[in-house]
Amino acid sequence: MPTTDGRADAHSPSLSDVFDRDSLSAARVRVDAQQSIYAPGDDDDAMYLIESGQVKLSMSSAAGQDCLLAIYTAGEVFGESCFAGPGKRFESAAAMQSTVVRRAPRREFLAEVRQASAIDSLVRHLAARMAERQTAVFDLVTMDAERRLAKVLLQFAEKLGTEDDPYLRIEQRISQEELSQIVGTTRPRITAFMQRFRRLGIIENSRQRAISVHRQRAREFVERE
């Protein structure tokens, strides 16, 4: 589940640079852990930059089944669904830990993107988000759930982890319920897969419920025929 903060080449400011422009009225908002930033049905018409903490995006079916779409961290931009036009949010965004975000109204943000000559960065950012969703659908169709879990753990480790050679240690807690939502399977199956990954040396538990992912073993497991 790769993500991007809209970084571009040296000739096009990144989207995070746009948030730093003095002419943009981007309000700084503190959000407690597990609290909503916006929810389905909200009249929220803004883009967000994460200054610190973590944010998860999710959707729920009419029957109440949850699907975790993505996890974003400091320096990343989210809220692209506002570009669908004025209307209500169809996804939810919530803080996974104590988080600080900067909120910029869509019209002001777009005006600043134009003024900063950052249109290329915005287009790349939106294309990357689309590619993420397409890859997630492709994996759901072509990979079994166990390999999808290994891929998700590897991506989280490369995104959030700290080097502990040959492992990447994920200090941030990601629950098995959240893993089941993003992998698209049940929590008992996630538990069984995690136990097998420990036996294979793909993951190991460290202090305070942190998970360490063996980068090479996880990659080999994902890429196996």
Image: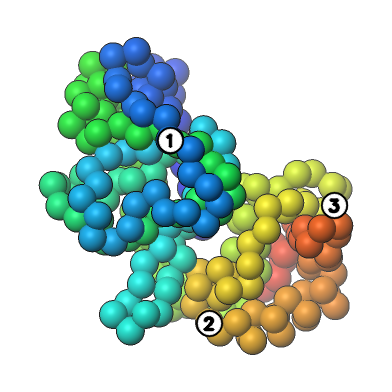
Residue displayed at 63% across by 72% down: 176
The amino acid sitting under disc 1 is: Val
Image coordinates of residue 181 in percent, x first then y, are 50, 73
N-terminal-most mark, 1 or 3? 1
N-terminal-most mark, 2 or 1? 1
Image coordinates of residue 221 in percent, x first then y, are 70, 71
Q: Residues within 10 Å of mark 1 (few under 14, many from 20)?
A: some
Residue on which the image places disc 1: 29
Find the residue positioned furthest to the left: 86
Q: Decide if residue 10 is in sight here.
A: yes
154 to the left or right of 10: right
Image coordinates of residue 199 in percent, x first then y, are 85, 77
Image coordinates of residue 213 in percent, x first then y, are 76, 59
Q: Nearer the viewer, residue 74 or 9?
A: 74
Which secondary structure, mark 2? Answer: loop
Residue displayed at 36% across by 67% down: 59
180 to the left or right of 223: left
Q: CA distance from mark 2 to mark 1?
A: 34 Å
211 to the left or right of 177: right
Q: CA distance from mark 2 to mark 3?
A: 29 Å
Q: Nearer the viewer, residue 143 or 50?
A: 50
Q: Decide if residue 151 is in sight here.
A: no
Residue on which the image places disc 3: 166
Given contact means CB atoms under 8 Å apart, are the residues at marks 2 and 3 in contact? no
Which secondary structure, mark 3? Answer: loop
The amino acid sitting under disc 3 is: Pro
Q: Residues within 10 Å of mark 2 (few under 14, many from 20)?
A: some
Residue on which the image places disc 2: 185
The amino acid sitting under disc 2 is: Thr
Which secondary structure, mark 1? Answer: strand
